[in-house]
Structures are given as C-alpha cells and as structure tokens.
Amino acid sequence: MNISDPIRRHARIAPHAPAILHFGETLTYAQFNAVIDSLATRMLGQGLMQGQAAGVMLSNSYAQLAFTLALARIGAVAVTSRDVVRGVGGIKVQASFVDETSAQGIDNIILVDETWARAPARTVATQIRGVPMHPGGKALCMVVSSSGTTGVPKAIPLTHDLLRARIHAKWLAFRAPDKARQICALGLESYYGMSSVLRTLWSGGMVATAIRWDDIPVAIPLHRIDYLVLSPLQLGRLLQSFPAGAGPFECLRTLEVGGSSVPPRLAAQARAQLCNNIQNAYGAAELGYVAGAGMEILEQRPGAIGYVAPGIEVQAVDDEHRLLAPGSEGTLRIRSATCIDAYLNDPEASAIAFRDGWFYPGDVGAVGDDGLLSVAGRKGEMINAGGVKASPRDIENVLLQNPDVAEAAAFAMNNPGTGVDEIWVAIVQKKHISMEVLHRHSIDKLGQRAPRSILVVESLPRNERGKVLQDELVRMAASASAGKPAAGTNRRP
C-alpha cells in the first residue's frame, strides 16, 4: 500500500466529505486528492523520480502534509528533518521544497508559495485524472530524525509498509473517535505528528491545520473538533492562553498527550477546561506507539505511563542485559515488528540502540506483571547525588504542584568544591514564589531527593522538538552561580 492511497480511495467513495480545514476553508477529499496529484505532476516535471529524496520543510502544516503525500505517490522520499537534509544519515537529497520562512541554511532549494497547494473548485476536483500510484510497500516514503535531550540527531527510515503497520497497531490499542475531526498541534515534520494526521485521514476524518493557539478555544466548538493531539508542553501553553470561562467542550471526546508524562496538576486543569477523557501515549519514532492509558488509571499509579500495547514486548534489564523481575526498575528494552533495524548510515549509534533484536530507547523504568509500564526518566538523566539517586520526573512533578510554577526541569550540577553532583531544578514562574516555601515543600515530599538549588529562568532551553537541553541548563546554572544576570538561583541551607 502507498500511504497516499487511502486519500484517493476516499476521494472516490466520499468525494464531498471534509478532509482538511485550512484557514477556515474546508477541502473535500476530492479536492485534497487533486492537490496531491497536482503536486506530484509538478514534482515529476521538476525531474524527481522514484527512489529519489527531497527535503520538505514548510512552515505551513497543510502544505507539509500535501507535499509529503505527493512525493510518496510518485515513489519518492520526503526528508522532513533539516539535520538530515544537511547530511545526517548520508542520504542524498535532490532538492528541498521550502518557503520564505524555512529556506535559511538550505542548499538546492525549490521555493514554494501558496499557489502550489491551492485547491481546485469542488466541481473540478472530481474530474482531475490522477498520476499513476507507486505501489509503496517496502519502499522508503519518509526519513525523519530522532533528537532527544542529547541534541544528537539520527536519521530514521520509514517505509510505506512500516507506517501502515504502525498506524494499524496503534488503532488496536488506542481508539480515537471514528471519523475524527482533529487538531494536531504536533509538527508534521515529526513522525508522531505525521502518523497522527494520517491515521485520521485514512479513517475518513477531518484534520484542521494552521490553527493558532489563541483560536483553538473558538475552533473547537465552531468546527466540532472531537480529537486533540499535543505534547504536555503544548497542553500547558494552550491552557495558559485560554480566556476566562472557555471550556470544557461537549464536542471534544479525546485528548491525546504524548512525548512525556502529564503532571497531575496539568491533567486536572485539562479536565476542567477541555474534556474528561485524557489519554497518555508513550512511543518513539524508532518503533511507533508502545503503551498508553487514560489519566484516571495512571494517576493511581505514580510513574506509570500506560499498558503495553498488543504485539509489543517491553522488558526491564540490568546492566548485563539480564531480565529483571516484574516491577523491578532497570534499563528498558523494546521488541516489535514495527521497529526499525538501525539508523541510516550511523553504525555507532545503531550498535548502542539496537541489540539482538531489541531497541534500547535509553529510558529507565519497570514493567508490572499486569503489563503496566512505568518510566522514571532517561538513563543518562537519572541523578546520582552522592549516592542519592533521583528521577528528574519525580522532582519536577513535586515542584509543579505549586500553582505558580509554570515549568520545571531537574538536572545534576557538579559542586566544584566537593566534586559531587547535586540535585538542581530550574523553574519558570507564573508570578513571584517564596523560595523558602518551595524548598520546604520539596523536602516534605522528597526528603533527601529534594533539590539543593532552585534556578529561576525566563524559559527552559529546548530543542526544536521541545526537549529540555540538560547541558544548557548546567551552563545557565554555572552562570547564575558566578553572579551573571542570565538567571537567579536560590540554595536551601
């Protein structure tokens, strides 16, 4: 199957059904399919051929989706990562489709404007003859990147068959509304964002694109949005932008939050202003959806992120790769038919992450005998402060219990006087907070794992995927300790 084939099928059996809502204009499946065919024809005219790769880095999410599907339709490969276009993974990119806001630093560009993906009239769309459909199958259709808190990008190859298998596997474990009307706040250059949107379109639903944060409270009831997908960071920013009295929404049936766990205070606020059904999702671009569950279940089990999906094996092992007893914390490894075998042209990173048929995501956690998966944090991020071991997530959740803490990120900071790591936490304040109160609350809840120092910053340093950059936090902490004005720090006695 080609990943664009379901769009063409819906264009034939339900041509007038809504597919895309873009800047208030609704495109039917016939119109959207015609746009894909028009772009595919233009790409062939540009000399792109089956098997070749082209960069797709467009600031417009609707255009990002249409160009990716057009390349897939002709058997070409969409490279959606700026790092991969610049050489990560060693894939040769023939040209890159960019707009004026995304062209900087990219060579061999094809400049795109709004006319490229303009939809034909509804009466015309059903009459447009499609380009021949590449069979898809085991051919590459996308190359995305994985770049976590280390900031080291790795190229991830995705075939048509792999995307199909992942979307079907998630459908078995995670039931979104049928024929959903979806807003996906995640970038469509990412695997998570693209697969979420494809799932909705494959099922005959509608995807709303280019919705600004301030417009979401209006867009949800206006367009009867019933499915919202976003990260915890985006959820927090969305709720901060809500006007007084907005929500909850009767039409909104499912809120999917993925990328990291949802702090209890944020979940409570989301229930009050969005909807009751909040589903947490855990996965990776290397293998897709792994586990998930509703927040009403997870809040009863601190640290839990969801039940392992059917067809997925997750184990916790020790440093010698020996299987640990159920419930014991160790290094997580995952095995699935939906997992890639290696990163593109990166044998060193592949040897670390892929071993004996298992993928090691770098997380520390445990698997209960009931299949409930808990994640304490990234292996390299677990803090060992003079023998006191702490999960950054546990520390952050305690700090976030204070309603005036907008964001929190725990990290290890070496004390040059003793040579021992200390537990620090960086926070973003909504308004001024008493550090004495915050320290006392932390000690009451965490004991020896309470942060030694609290660093107050204007914003947390993040990469383009929203991951907090630990090295940058250490640099900011060092500057604050030296008396530089980049941030303020407060140490408990």
Image: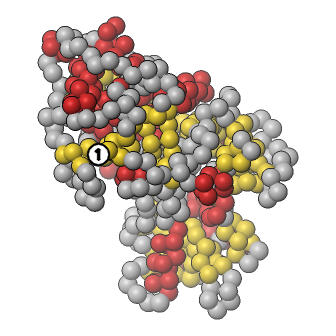
Q: Disc count in the image? A: 1
Front residue of 324 and 249:
324
The reply to whether residue 274 is visible in this rendering is no
Task: Residue 488: name its quadrant.
Answer: bottom left
Q: Disc 1 residue type?
A: Ala
Q: Give the x, y percent position of residue 27.
A: 23, 23
Mark 1, residues whose alpha carbon is within 10 Å: few (<14), some, or many (≥20)? Answer: some
Front residue of 39 and 480:
39
Front residue of 272 and 15:
15
Front residue of 294 and 196:
196
Q: Is residue 19 above or below residue 314?
A: above
Question: Residue at the spot x=59%, y=40% of the render?
Answer: 340
Question: Residue at the spot x=15%, y=11% of the render?
Answer: 123
Task: Left or right? Give the position of 215 relative to 166.
Answer: left
The reply to whether residue 481 is visible in this rendering is yes
Q: Give the x, y percent position of residue 169.
A: 59, 27
Image quarter (top left, top right, bottom left or bottom right) of the C terminus: bottom right
Q: Give the x, y percent position of residue 312.
A: 68, 34
Q: Give the x, y percent position of residue 232.
A: 48, 49
**Residue, far top:** 13
Q: Is residue 204 above or below residue 327?
A: above
Residue position for label 1? 95
Q: Is residue 79 above or below residue 196?
A: below
Task: Residue 352: name its quadrant.
Answer: bottom right
Q: Which secondary structure lies at badge 1?
A: strand
Question: Residue at the spot x=28%, y=55% of the render?
Answer: 106
Task: Left or right? Give the position of 275 relative to 112.
Answer: right
Coloring scheme of the render? Answer: secondary structure
Question: Residue at the spot x=74%, y=44% of the render?
Answer: 356
Task: Left or right? Give the position of 232 relative to 374.
Answer: left
